[in-house]
Image: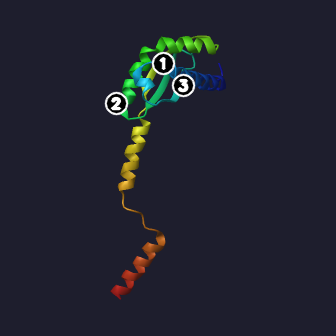
Amino acid sequence: MANHNIARLTEDVKREISTAMTQLKDKHIANGLVTVTDVEITNDLSYCKVYVSALGGGEKTEEAVNALQKAEGFFKKRINARIKMRKMPEITFVADKSLDYYEKINNIITKLPPMRSESEEEAENTDSETETD
């Protein structure tokens, strides 16, 4: 199977899982905003990693991953009915921590002192040179 077919299949699986999540009755998924951020399918269609993120941080995401993993059969059935595939991959749900990492980096950056422009530095350098003369 060519790579462009895998990419298209990946997007189709991502869309189907996102759509199917709205039909689950689990409180961890129904109450929280759970998003499929990425899907990776191996070239031999044996494994499918689904990265999910939930509004509320890491703990909510882990609860959502556990609930989604329990509903793996539901997702396989849904995907099999809607997408024609040679082989149905094993679906593994993984917590996507990239949003938490982004938030951590953003907090560090906002705490940094503001950068001075080159013109301000040149003005300061000329002021200090004139004071020493």
Residue 89 visible in this rendered orientation of the protein: no
Q: CA distance from mark 1 to mark 2?
A: 20 Å
Q: Residue furthest bottom?
A: 133
Local SS, label 1: loop
Q: Which residue is mark 3?
A: 18
Q: Which residue is mark 1?
A: 24
Of the residues shown, which amino acid type is indicated by label 3?
Answer: Ser
The residue shown at (52%, 15%) is: 75
The residue shown at (45%, 76%) is: 122
Foreground residue among 78 and 90: 78
Local SS, label 2: helix
Of the residues shown, which amino acid type is indicated by label 1?
Answer: Leu
Q: CA distance from mark 1 to mark 3?
A: 11 Å
Which quadrant would residue 29 be assigned to in this image? top left
Relative to 6, residue 46 above or below: above
The residue shown at (40%, 77%) is: 124
Which mark, residue 55?
none
On-image quarter of the N terminus:
top right
Residue 130 percent coordinates (x, y) = 38, 86
Of badges 1 and 3, the one in the foreground is 1
Which quadrant would residue 64 be assigned to in this image? top left
Relative to 78, residue 36 above or below: below
Q: Residues within 10 Å of mark 2 (few under 14, many from 20)?
A: few
First reached walking from the N terminus: tag 2 or tag 3 = 3
Q: Which residue is mark 2?
A: 59
Foreground residue among 36 and 116: 36
Q: CA distance from mark 2 to mark 3?
A: 20 Å
Residue 20 percent coordinates (x, y) = 54, 20
